[in-house]
Image (cartoon, coloured by chain):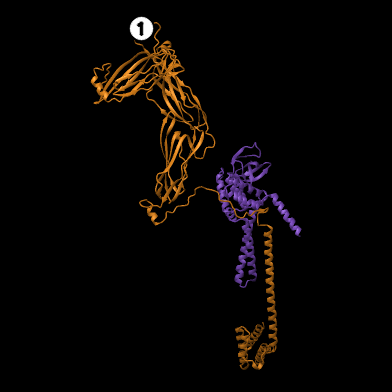
Amino acid sequence: MKRAIFLFYLLVALSSSVNAQTPKELWTNANNFYSKAQYADALQSYLKIEESGYASESLFYNLGNCYFKINEIGKSILYYERALKLNPSDQDLLNNLSLAKDFSLDKIEEVPDFILKTWIEDINYSFSSDTWSYFTLLFFAAMALLLLNFRFGLSSRLRKISFFLAMASLLLGFVAGYFSLSQKYRYSLKNTAIVMKPVSTVRSSPDDSGKSLFILHEGTKLELLEEIGEWKRIELADGRQGWITSLDIEVI
Amino acid sequence: MIVMYLKRVMLLMGSLVISIACMAQGAFTVDAPRVVELDESFRLVFTTNSEPTSFNPPTFSGFDVLAGPSASTMSSTQIINGKKTESFQVSYTYVLQPKSVGKFTISAASVVIGGKGYTSNPITIEVVKGDGSVAGNTEKSAQATGNVSGNDIFMRMSISKGRVVKGESLVATLKIYTKVPISGFESVKFPTFNGFWSQEIETPSNIEFVRESVNGKIYDAAVLRRYMLVPQQTGSLAIEPSEIICNIQIKSPTGAGQRSVFDDFFESYQTVKKRITAPGMHIMVDALPAGAPATFAGGVGDFQMSAKLTRDTVSANEAVSLIVTINGTGNINLIEAPKIEFPADFEVYDVKISDKSNQTNKGVSGIKEFEFPIIPRGSGHFVLGPVKFSYFDISSRKYITLSSGDLILKVGKDKGGNSGMSSSLSLGVNKQAVKNLTNDIRYIHSGLSHLKRGNQFFVASLTFYALLVLMISLYFVTNRFLSKRIERNRDVAGVKNRRANKVARARLKTAESFLKQKLYTGFYEELHRAILGYCSDKLALPLSDLSREKIAEILTQKSVKPDLIQELLSLIEACEYARYAPDPGGVEMDKNYSRAIRLISDLEV
């Protein structure tokens, strides 16, 4: 047993010496670099964390900040959008994203959605997926307690109220669960992208001979519809469609 | 207006001369052509404006004195609207002829006027080997051809520097050279300077011709225009050709052989129009070297800077000015105001620029003053500047940054006094919104990183499901536990009830049979006996000790409900009463029987 523990420590020591820095150290270093306005160094450290397979809303947010500071607006928007997929409710993130979008050239009039859908989305995105999942568990726990009260309550009036409350909790629990799952699903969907090239042409067909429909600039968000070879069919927020080469964009 | 010319009548005007001599200023000048031809005789004239007592002639090396000095006196008196002005002039004239080609200097001459000595400047005369067609004696060439060749008259643009850096000033001079008399100009087309900031620094209204030698030939030359140019672009900038049409007077070509007497006597002149152009030229403009400091404001030349505040102690809401003065030579007109960062609390108004500059042949020198009017809104101790001004130094080919020291401004409390804001200030502080200076992104999240590999979401994770399952199973366990307990509780009560009922029914068995037989007295006796018996059994009391009070007391001690006790007592009473009372009917019997059953059951439970 003792030998096994010793071996385990040895392995950990080896792996850390190979990796040079743990993600935690990298994170602290990167934050220090950023606070000293050495944005390029901070960026390198954050990217190392990302390369080692880690992700978090804070990591993407900080990456977005670094890219913004070194004037790479496209990348900055890309990482903000990635962070937004993990937590659509962070105020700092929303603020910085809107500022970064001010620096991108394309102004696209969004087609307004059905008002109810917008409302529901607003409610959904006012909390992160994790928060909604905690709500789900809470509501289910509340429902369980209320059902017990309904079954074994002393007065009939209390039992009646308990029943209705339990039903409401069940409903809310399902809604919260749906929101939480929908955000998780949205994250797994790779159907949006950001234009990375300063100028990129959108064509009418998936080859270079296609007619140029319009020009997009760095930082514009696109929806991906289908893919043929190196070409992707995209739709803008205002409904216009076309084909763009995969080299010019990066999927969020 | 009376103009009088009197020559060599000095004696006649003797008395006048004395009076003029008294107010003499004693100027002594020399006048001679700068360029002469080898075999040309020319005049050298020394002039003074009062009667000299002695004249020391200069030494002439390289020249033969053909005649002179011949002194002449000129005096004039003007009376204009009753105002009399007089002038007096004495001149000594030499007629000279050069001996050889070259440059010769005639030394200074001196005069003594009123006991004081005056000296003229030495004069240098260039002697060239001419072709005989001296300007002014144009008859020969004009006569010969009856036409004017390009050599006789031309125009030329000359520039002070051929290669400059952007922003460096240069002077361009447009000159006309002629050997023929010109009577006038027509349709003058002056050059345009594309890519330059240009300013005319000399626009003579009277064109004055001065002799000049060009390639060994003598011309009358005159400046038409002089420009100051400051290139604003880099590369090879073209100065476009300029063009002028001259009216030239030439002797009219008279008909062959037909020379009348009058032709010889009155030379007839004819005006010929000739178009002459000054060729265009190129100026190489180099870009300023890279690495200009951020405070570079376009100045090229040689400058000094100073900055000062009009006052260093003010009250809040009181105006004060920061004055930045730049002086030196170079493109001072094109210098922009230096950028100064004032504290955000200061109200800064538009810069006032005043410009005192004079153009010379070398460029522009002068003073430029930038006045920044500011009003500090809050009190405190402020450090302004340092004001920095950078320029490109032409001689050292380097950027030079001048910096003023820190300017310290003490702002005291608002005096209020007669300012418009005093009324609101006396009531309270003037609130102002927090101004956004610039927009910037918010700071990074520097707290916990929440780094996770793989699945980023809690929902549908193993923990989530485990918690959900745990919750459901907890519910079922609790539910089962609670329902079991209730079940058990309910069973105990049921058994007890059933047993109590059984006991009651057994006790009242005889009473029941009497009830069925409708034996009134027997029923009540039996009922009374059964109840008392039950009580004696239950309370472990002998029948003889049983009284209503005793029963009530013991039952109260055993914490039996008071309404049950009351019921028991009232039933016993009812039984005792009924034993001696007449039969009121079967209904009462049934009622009392069921009362007894219920009472015993309840007491048993």
Asked which quadrant contains residue B524, the reply is bottom right
Asked which quadrant contains residue B99, the reply is top left
In percent of width and height, residue B162 lies at 50, 26
In percent of width and height, residue B79 lies at 25, 24
A120 with respect to B163 (left or right): right
Q: Which chain is orange?
A: B
B9 with respect to B160 (left or right): left
Specify few, some or many for label 1: CA neighbours under 10 Å numbering under 14, 14-19, or 20 or more: few
B366 with respect to A236 (left or right): left
Task: Give the vertical position of B481 relative to B458 (above or below).
Answer: below
**Colour of chain A in the image:** purple
The residue identified by callout 1 is B260
Along the viewing direction, whichever of A116 and B33 lies nearer the viewer: B33
Along the viewing direction, whichever of B195 and B127 lies nearer the viewer: B127
Residue farthest along the front direction in this orientation: B115
Task: Give the vertical position of B149 relative to B354 (above or below).
Answer: above
Along the viewing direction, whichever of B582 and B276 lies nearer the viewer: B276
Q: Quadrant of the N terminus of chain B?
A: top left
The amino acid at mark 1 is Ser
Q: Secondary structure at mark 1?
A: loop
Q: Chain letter of disc 1? A: B
Examine the rendering and report whether any part of residue B203 can be seen: yes
Along the viewing direction, whichever of A82 and B438 lies nearer the viewer: B438
